[in-house]
Image (cartoon, grey):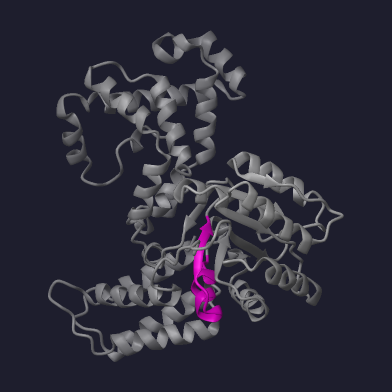
C-alpha cells in the first residue's frame, strides 16, 4: 500500500537536502510536487487543499536546527499533518454494552464485507478474548449465507443459521436472541450489499439498524476505489449512523487515496484495514503508523506485534537450543523458517513494514518472490525424513524423484540446496556468541537470514 505515494514524496523531500532553511520559494516548489503526488494517489481534492494549506502555514519561515536538514523538518510537518488527516489516534471498537454487543456491517457488493466479518470475528477472539457469533442477513446474493458459514467454521466463530426465504429484519432480531442465549460477547451482523447505492437497500438496512440498535455500525469499503470510497462512505453516513470504517484490499492498493480521504470527508474513523485475503489479514488502523509507512519510515511497531502473535515461539526456542548445543541446522529447520515467514504475510509483507525500504531499488524489491517460498517448501516436503536431516545424501536420482514429487525441475532442487548451504553457514556462525559478530559484519544492511532466503 502507498507505494506510489511513498516513492513520489521520497523524491520530493530529498530535493531539499543541502539547503539551510525552509524559504517561500523551496516550500512552494515542494508543495506543488506534494499536491501532485496526493492527487495521483486519488486523494479527494478538498482534502488535498486543506492538507497543503496546513503544511504551508507551518513550514514557511521555519528555522532549521543544526541537527536537522530542511528535508527532515518538512518530513516532520508532513508526518504530523498525515496523522491529523487520518484521525490522530487508533479508535477501538466500543463494546461496552450488555452482551451481546451488536456490530452491524454495511457496504456495497464486492467490497469484501462477508470476509471482513470473519476477519473481525477472528481478531476479536484473538485480541479481545471475546466469544463471537455471526449471522448473515444477505438473502439476495446466491450462497452468501453458506459463504459466511464456511468462514465462521474456519475462524471458530458461532454461526447462527438463516434462510433465503426469511426477512432480513427478522433474521437480525432472532440472531440477537440466539446470541444472548449462547452467552456470546459479540454478535456480528452481515447485511446485503448492492452494486450501487439505492433507496431500497438503504431502507432495509435502516430497518435492521432500528430493530437491533447496534453499538457499532461499520462501513466496509474497497480502498482501491480511491476517493470514491470516501464519497460512498459519506452517502451511507448520511442515512445510517456509522461509527467507523473498515478499509479492505489495502494490500493491492498502491495509491492510498482512500485512507487519506475517508476520515476528512465522513468525519468517521478508520478502525481496521484488510491487508490480505486470509482471515488473519486484518490490522487495527493506527494513523501514526500508516503515516510512517507513507513516508518510507516503515512500521516497526506493527511488525513486532505481528511477530509476537504469529511466530511460533516454541519452534524458535527449540532451534536456538539446538544451535547452542552445536547440533546441525537441517532442512526441517530451514522449512520451519520459511513457514514462519509465510505466517508473517511473506517477505513482501514484512518488507513493507521495514524502515528504509523506500530507498531500496525496485530491481531488488522485485526479486522477492513469495511464490518461490511455497515452491521451496513443496520441494522439502517431497523429501524423505532422512534426506531432510542429512541433505548430503541427495544426489542425481534422488533429485529427480524430489523434483517429480514437488512438480518442479531438478535445477529448482539444486537452487534450494545451494540456498540451504548458505543458511547453514550463517547458522554455524551463531554458535559461541557468533551472532553478535555476524550482526556487526552486516552493519544493518539486511536482516539476518536474508542471504539464505529465497530472494
Viewer-nearest residue: 345 or 419: 345
Q: Is residue 6 magenta?
A: no
Q: Is residue 455 above or below residue 424?
A: below
Does 366 sit left or right of 104 as displayed? left
Viewer-nearest residue: 349 or 361: 349
- Say which residue appears at 47% left-offset and 22% top-offset: 414
Viewer-nearest residue: 4 or 153: 153
Note whether residue 339 is visible: yes
x and y percent of residue 272 in the render?
51, 61
Figure label count: 0
Q: Is residue 231 above or below residue 294?
A: below
- Say which residue appears at 77% left-offset and 50% top-offset: 162
Picture quadrant where residue 196 is located:
bottom right
Q: Is residue 452 above or below residue 165?
A: above
x and y percent of residue 87 in the render?
43, 74
Does 410 sit left or right of 104 as displayed? left
Q: Is residue 135 above or below residue 383?
A: below
Magenta extent: 255-274
Note whether residue 394 is visible: no
- Say which residue appears at 41% left-offset and 63% top-offset: 286
- Say which residue appears at 56% left-offset and 63% top-offset: 246
Task: For the C terminus, give its image quadrant.
Answer: top left
Q: Is residue 261 magenta?
A: yes
x and y percent of residue 285 in the render?
46, 62
x and y percent of residue 356 in the render?
32, 56
Outermost residue toward the right? Answer: 165
Does 241 sit left or right of 144 as displayed? left
Amino acid at each position: 500500500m502507498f507505494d506510489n505515494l511513498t516513492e513520489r514524496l521520497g523524491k520530493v523531500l530529498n530535493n531539499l537536502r543541502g539547503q539551510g532553511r525552509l524559504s517561500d520559494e523551496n516550500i512552494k516548489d515542494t508543495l506543488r510536487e506534494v499536491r501532485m503526488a496526493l492527487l495521483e494517489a486519488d486523494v479527494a481534492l478538498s482534502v488535498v487543499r486543506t492538507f497543503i494549506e496546513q503544511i504551508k502555514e507551518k513550514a514557511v519561515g521555519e528555522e532549521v536546527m543544526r541537527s536537522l536538514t530542511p528535508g527532515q523538518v518538512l518530513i516532520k510537518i508532513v508526518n504530523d499533518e498525515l496523522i491529523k488527516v487520518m484521525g490522530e489516534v487508533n479508535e477501538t471498537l466500543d463494546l461496552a454494552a450488555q452482551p451481546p454487543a451488536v456490530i452491524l456491517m454495511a457496504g456495497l457488493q464486492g467490497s469484501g464485507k462477508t470476509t471482513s466479518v470473519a476477519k473481525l470475528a477472528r481478531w476479536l477472539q484473538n485480541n479481545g478474548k471475546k466469544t463471537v457469533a455471526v449471522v448473515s442477513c444477505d438473502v439476495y446474493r446466491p450462497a452468501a449465507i453458506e459463504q459466511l458459514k464456511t468462514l465462521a467454521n474456519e475462524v471458530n466463530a458461532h454461526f447462527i443459521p438463516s434462510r433465503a426465504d426469511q426477512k432480513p429484519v427478522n433474521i437480525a432480531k432472532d440472531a440477537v436472541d440466539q446470541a444472548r442465549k449462547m452467552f456470546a460477547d459479540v454478535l456480528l451482523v452481515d447485511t446485503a450489499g448492492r452494486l450501487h447505492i439505492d433507496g431500497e437497500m438503504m431502507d432495509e438496512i435502516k430497518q435492521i439498524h432500528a430493530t437491533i440498535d447496534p453499538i457499532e455500525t461499520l462501513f466496509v469499503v474497497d480502498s482501491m476505489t480511491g476517493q470514491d470510497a470516501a464519497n460512498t462512505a459519506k452517502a451511507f453516513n448520511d442515512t445510517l449512523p456509522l461509527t467507523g470504517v473498515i478499509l479492505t484490499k489495502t494490500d493491492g492498493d498502491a495509491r492510498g487515496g482512500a485512507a487519506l480521504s475517508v476520515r476528512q470527508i465522513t468525519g468517521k474513523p478508520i478502525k481496521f484495514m484488510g491487508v490480505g485475503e486470509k482471515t488473519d489479514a486484518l490490522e487495527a488502523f493506527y494513523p501514526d503508523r500508516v503515516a510512517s509507512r507513507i513516508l518510507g519510515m516503515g512500521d516497526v511497531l506493527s511488525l513486532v506485534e505481528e511477530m509476537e502473535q504469529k511466530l511460533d515461539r516454541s519452534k524458535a526456542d527449540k532451534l536456538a537450543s539446538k544451535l547452542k548445543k552445536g547440533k546441525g541446522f537441517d532442512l526441517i529447520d530451514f522449512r520451519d523458517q520459511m513457514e514462519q515467514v509465510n505466517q508473517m504475510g511473506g517477505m513482501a509483507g514484512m518488507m513493507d513494514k521495514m524502515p528504509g525500504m523506500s530507498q531500496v531499488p525496485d530491481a531488488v524489491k522485485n526479486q522477492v518472490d513469495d511464490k518461490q517460498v511455497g515452491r521451496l517448501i513443496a520441494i522439502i516436503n517431497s523429501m524423505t525424513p532422512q534426506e531432510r536431516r542429512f541433505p548430503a545424501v541427495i544426489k542425481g536420482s534422488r533429485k529427480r524423484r524430489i523434483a517429480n514429487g514437488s512438480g518442479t525441475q531438478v535445477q529448482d532442487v539444486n537452487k534450494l540446496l545451494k540456498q540451504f548451504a548458505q543458511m547453514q553457514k550463517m547458522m554455524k556462525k551463531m554458535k559461541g556468541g557468533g551472532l553478535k559478530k555476524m550482526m556487526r559484519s552486516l552493519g544493518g544492511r539486511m536482516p539476518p537470514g536474508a542471504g539464505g532466503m529465497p530472494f
